[in-house]
Amino acid sequence: MYNGADFLSGYCGIFLEHCGDLVISLDLKFKIIMINSTAADVLDILRNETIGQNLFEICKHSQVELSFTEKDLECSEKLINKFVEGYIVYPQKQKKFILWKYVFINNQQKDKCCFLIFGKDVSVLEKHKEDALLTTTYLDNIVENLPEYIYWKDLNLTYRGCNKHVANYLNLPSSASIIGKTDKDFDWSEERIQALLEIDKKIIETGIPNVVEEVIPRPDKSKRIIVK
């Protein structure tokens, strides 16, 4: 008679082998029970030679660093059924960013208990994040050092940023200090605040840029004429 458990185990094994994520099963002594080809390739180890071997000793011998340790798995009550950010570092210091999930499979028969480890390689996504951050940094530096006075507001007419020239003019300690402020937070006349409000509302309503010549009072009582 065909064993239903063997049937399920066989098909689960096929699924885990081809799911595309890293899948590793360890016994309570952290010896490898099962490792799929994706995990073996990413960890750069030979599957046939690793079954029955301690995962952490293998990685130590190969100079591969994992972001989790035996102690992390020993605290089975602390194992969270969700992915956590982690990594794999190789001997040449190359690094892969991995989302790990550790699951403790409890069984009445202690010798049947095991740890199931899943890993998602998100290195490409992290690279995109780094590239986007680098691009944003370049753009911030460009805006910060342009000779013009530059600031921007959200639809609630709250300042969301400015460059150093605006910060200096407003006597702010840094460009970031303007974030969250409105025109009413500065020592300006009601007439000027109302004029700025009308200009901002017109731009929001029409989407059409508005060019105005404005006389801006400075802290030293001098005036600066700006076209904006």
Image (cartoon, rainbow, N blue to C red):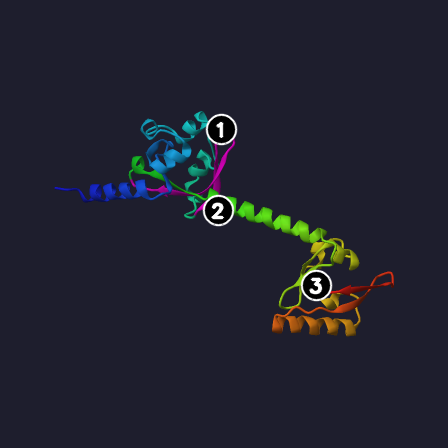
Residue at the image position 15 percent from the left and 42 percent from the top? 2
Under mark 3, the amino acid is Lys
Q: Mark 2, residues whose alpha carbon is within 10 Å: few (<14), some, or many (≥20)? A: few
The residue pinned by badge 3 equals: 181
In this picture, which residue range is highlighted in magenta? 83-108
Is residue 98 located in the magenta-colored stretch of the structure? yes
In the image, which is nearer the foreground, mark 2 or mark 3? Answer: 2
**Toward the viewer: 117 or 138?**
138
The residue pinned by badge 2 equals: 125
Occupied quadrant, residue 45: top left
Instruction: Label 2: state its secondary structure.
Output: helix
- Measured in 3D between alpha carbons, the distance from the residue under mark 2 to the one under mark 1, in whole angstroms, is 22 Å
In the image, which is nearer the foreground, mark 2 or mark 1? Answer: 2
Horizontal arrangement in the rendering, residue 103 relative to residue 208 (left or right): left
Choose the circle earlier in sequence order: 3 or 1.
1
**Toward the viewer: 114 or 226?**
226
Under mark 1, the amino acid is Pro
